[in-house]
Image (cartoon, rainbow, N blue to C red):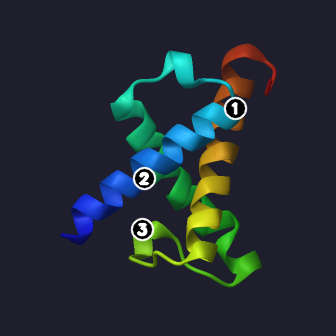
Amino acid sequence: MNFIIWIVIGGILGWLASLVMKTDAQQGMILNVVVGVLGALLGGWLLAPLFGTGTINQNDFSLGSLLVSFLGAVVLLAVVNLLRRGTTR
């Protein structure tokens, strides 16, 4: 059951990150889930030690972990945009 919640929350976070980075028109539902989950991994690696919290990948669904996972997804989209176009938008 946690796996399904993890996928749904990852999809929502990926969708919100794509809205913030203005890449929503280029992404579908599957890519939003991938961005959300990979962003949570990136956020757990880079940001979780700074904030002292977990991420959604660690079955921690607190407000701090959702924020870290969201910020990781935004950073991931910024890096992808930088590599693709040379700008982060």
Mark toward the viewer: 2 or 3: 2
Which of disc 3 and disc 2 is earlier in sequence? 2
SS at mark 3 in the image: helix
Q: Does residue 38 appear to the left or right of 4 in the view shown?
A: right
Amino acid residing under circle 2:
Gly
Residue 64 screen position, x and y as percent = 63, 75
Mark count: 3
Q: Quadrant of residue 86?
A: top right
User: Which residue occupies the foreground of this view, 55 or 41?
Assistant: 55
Amino acid residing under circle 3:
Asn
Q: Quadrant of residue 80?
A: top right
- Label 2, label 1: how far apart the Cα atoms are: 16 Å
Check contact, mark 3 vs mark 1: CB within 8 A.
no
- Dot 3 corresponds to which residue? 57
Q: Is residue 35 above or below residue 70?
A: above
- Dot 2 corresponds to which residue? 10
Q: Is residue 4 above or below residue 30?
A: below
Q: Residue at x 69, y 25 (%)?
A: 81
Q: Does residue 57 appear to the left or right of 39 in the view shown?
A: left
Q: Residue at x 59, y 74 (%)?
A: 63
Q: Residue at x 69, y 32 (%)?
A: 21
Neighbour tally class for label 3: few under 14, some 14-19, many 20 plus, Cα within 10 Å: many
Q: Is residue 69 above or below residue 58?
A: above
- Dot 1 corresponds to which residue? 21
Q: Work out which quarter of the rendered image holds the C terminus and state it.
A: top right
Q: Work out which quarter of the rendered image holds the N terminus and state it.
A: bottom left
- Label 3, label 1: how far apart the Cα atoms are: 22 Å
